[in-house]
Amino acid sequence: MQDSYDVIIVGGGITGASLLYMLSRYTDAKRILLLEKFDSFAALNSDSINNAQTLHFGDIETNYSLEKSRETKEEAEIVLKYLSMLPKKEYDSITKRCGKMVLGVGEDEIQKLDKIYDSGLKHIFPGLKKIGPNEIAKLEPNVMKKRNMEEKVQALKSDNGQMMNFRNLTYSFVKRAKLASKGRVPIKLNTKVTSIEGSQGDFQILANGKKYHSKFVVFCSGSYSLYFAKMMGYEKNLSILCVGGNFYTAPKVLNGKVYRVQMGGIPFAAVHGDPDITNPHITRFGPTVTIYPELEKGNSSTFSDYMKTFDFDLATTSSLFNILLNKDIRRILWNNMFYDMPGIGTGIFLKNEVSKIVPSLTVKDVKLAPQMGGIRPQIIDENKKALVLGESKIKEQGIIFNITPSPGATSCLASAIEDTSYICDQIGLNLDIKAIERNLVNKDSMPITMRKLKNW
C-alpha cells in the first residue's frame, strides 16, 4: 500500500528524533516516517532558547527521590555515550563541560542539603561534595560578593556539569538516522496531523489532507500528545497543567550552573542561574512558573485544543483543589504571578530569586527575555489527585503517547530504547540489543536499563 509504514512518529523535537535514530540504527524496520508540523526540527521546547540547557544527572535536583536520581543519572550517561561516538566538531556544537552546584541559603535549606546528601545521594554520586563559603567564592565569586556575611550558605558541588544545546542534539539524531536508514526514513516538515483513527496493524493518520497508514504510531508531540490520546479515547483520568517558563538575562556573572534547593515532590524547578551555551556573554535566570491555557506558549490558537485535554468534571476539580492545598505550590504560583508584570516584575524577581544566587545584581542588570522559555506539560493524575513528577508515557496496543516535561530531554535516549523495545515486541521487528549495549549503555547501569529492554 502506498504511504504505508511500519512506524510513524509524530513530532520532530528531541524525543521524536531520538526515537527515529533508535529505530533506524538498531532495528530492521523497513519504512519509518516522521511528521513535523513546523518547518524545522526542535522548533519548540527542544530549541536551546526554550530550556535550561542542562543535562540532568539527579545529583543537584533536590526534589528527586533517590530512585529518580539513580534513573536520571543512567539516562544522562546514555546521552554521554552517544555523544562520545561523534566527531569532535559535532560533539563541541552540542555540549560543553561546566561547573555545577546546588546552593543552600539559610539554616533550613542547609539542613535539607545535609539530609539529602547523607540519606544516600553521596553514594550514588561519589563526586558530589559539600563545600562552604570559601570554596563557593573560589568557584563562583559573584555568589558570595556583597552577600550578608551573617547569612549562612552551603553548597553541594557536582563533577557532572554539562551544558547542552538540545536543538543541535536533535539535528544530530536526524542526521545519524538518515545515515543508518539508507533511504528508509522519509521526513515531512510543514505537515500537521489533524486526526488519527484505526487500530494496531492499520492506523490512519490524516496530515495536510493526506492519509498515511502505519502498523504502529508514536506521538512525541509535547503537550499535544495528550490531546491526541484523548482524541482516541485514552487516559480519561489525565489532564494537563501547561506551565510556561520564562527566563531573565543578565551580563555574565556565573562560571557554571547554580541551582537552588527545591521542595521534594514539587515538579516545578526552583529558579537557577545558568551560563548560555549559545551566548557566552550572558547568564540566564529562571524558569518562572506561569500557568498558560494553551498547548504552545504564546500561541493563542492552541487554546481550544488545550480545553479538549482538560476535563471539567468533579475528579479534575478535586485534583486541582488537592494540588493547591500544598502550601509550597501555592507560594510558587503566587510569587510567579508578579514576575512577568511590566514595571514591578523585575524588581520582585530580583529580590525573591536572583539576589539569593547573585546578591550584587541590580534591577538595571536583569532583563526579562520574553523570547525565551517554553511550555512544560505537567500531568494531573486524577486517580492520585496530584501532579506527576517527570515524563509520562501512555502505552496502548500499537500506539504510544510521550508527554515530556523536564527532564525529558535528558531521558530522550532512554525513552527511545524503551519505546523501540515495545514497538519491536508489538509488530515483530528485530532489535540489535548487543549493539545498543555496546554503543549506549554503561555496564554499571545495566540493572535499570534491563527494565527498559524487557527482552535483554
Image (cartoon, rainbow, N blue to C red):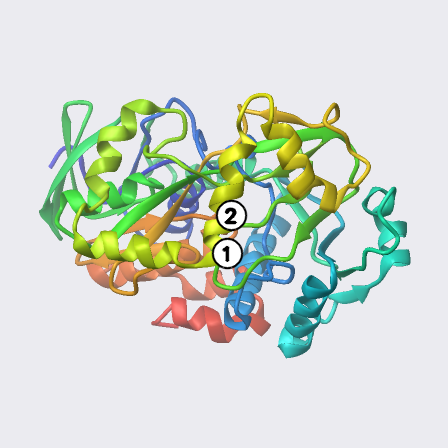
Q: Which residue is mark 2?
A: 332
218 vs 103, left or right, is left
**Rendered image quadrant of residue 255:** top right
Total labels: the figure holds 2
Residue 270 image offset from top left, x and y in percent: 58, 49
Which residue: 81% across, 46% down?
A: 143
- Identified at 37% across, 56% down, the residue is 323
Quadrant the C terminus occupies: bottom left
Q: Are marks 1 and 2 in contact (CB under 8 Å)?
A: yes
Residue 197 shows in the view: yes
How far across and how far down the image is residue 58, in percent?
A: 59, 61
Relative to 69, does residue 44 appear above or below in the rendering? above
Q: Quadrant of the N terminus?
A: top left
Q: Amino acid at mark 1?
A: Asp
Q: Residue 235, percent across and down?
A: 20, 55
Q: CA distance from mark 1 to mark 2?
A: 6 Å
Residue assigned mark 1: 328
The single residue placed furthest to the left in the displayed view is: 198
Callout 2: few (<14), some (14-19), or many (20+) C-alpha neighbours within 10 Å?
Answer: some
Q: Is residue 437 above or below residue 214?
A: below
Question: Left or right: 97 with respect to 228?
Answer: right
| Crowding at mark 1 (Cα within 10 Å: few <14, some 14-19, many 20+) | some
Image point (70%, 28%), residue name: 366
Q: Secondary structure at mark 2?
A: helix
The three-letter code of the residue at mark 2 reads Ile
Identify the residue shown where x is 84% and y is 54%: 136
Mark 1 residue element: helix
Question: Which label number is shown at residue 201?
Answer: none
Q: Is residue 123 above or below residue 356?
A: below
